[in-house]
Image (tube, helix red, strand yellow):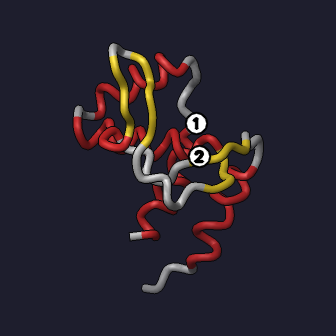
Amino acid sequence: MRINTELFITPSLNNAINNTIPIINNPNLTLDNIYALDNTFTGLNNVIESGLSDIYYDIVTCEKSIEKYYGKEYVSVFYQKLGIEKDDNKSSYYSILNELKK
């Protein structure tokens, strides 16, 4: 059975586009590309593909990195420290986009 990609992705796209917060992003915002000293952010590495995007793209990319290196239980701590609630629609959408890039 073939899945109609347009029918599958379009609802997620419509939900993800709502309430976007545009930023200059870093599509490689993983833990190994973030520099810190004494618990203070000091810089980023690998910013070649940076551009304008929804802030949630970077948040989801970082979320997946935390999950990979530390485990799912730390994702909630990540969102708590950011002071925001996880948006499951955007998380799913940007996770799918990242998988399609591979």
Camera-nearest residue between 42 and 84: 42
Query: What's under tag 2, amino acid-wise?
Result: Lys
Where is residue 15 shown, x and y percent of the image? Answer: 70, 51
Camera-nearest residue between 93 and 42: 42
How far separated are the C-alphas under marks 2 and 1?
A: 6 Å
Query: What's under tag 1, amino acid-wise?
Result: Asp
Camera-nearest residue between 15 and 102: 102
Residue at the spot 67% in from the left edge and 59% down from the top edge: 13
Q: Quadrant of the N terminus?
A: bottom left
Residue at the spot 39% in from the left edge and 20% down from the top edge: 77
Where is residue 82 shown, x and y percent of the image? Answer: 52, 21
Q: Quadrant of the C terminus?
A: bottom left
Camera-nearest residue between 23 and 38: 38
Residue at the spot 45% in from the left edge and 34% down from the top edge: 43
Q: Secondary structure at mark 1?
A: loop
Q: Residue furthest bottom?
A: 1
Residue identifier under label 2: 90
Q: Are marks 2 and 1 in contact (CB under 8 Å)?
A: yes
Instruction: Specify few, some or many for label 2: CA neighbours under 10 Å numbering under 14, 14-19, or 20 or more.
Output: many
Residue 84, by quadrant, is top right
On the rendered structure, is 24 left or right of 68?
A: right
Where is residue 28 shown, x and y percent of the image? Answer: 43, 52
Vertical placement of residue 20 versus 51, above or below: above
Vertical placement of residue 93 versus 83, above or below: below
Q: Which mark is residue 73?
A: none
Residue identifier under label 1: 87
Where is residue 38 shown, x and y percent of the image? Answer: 33, 14
Residue at the spot 42% in from the left edge and 40% down from the top edge: 62
Q: Secondary structure at mark 2?
A: helix
Q: How many marks?
A: 2
Q: Residue furthest right?
A: 19
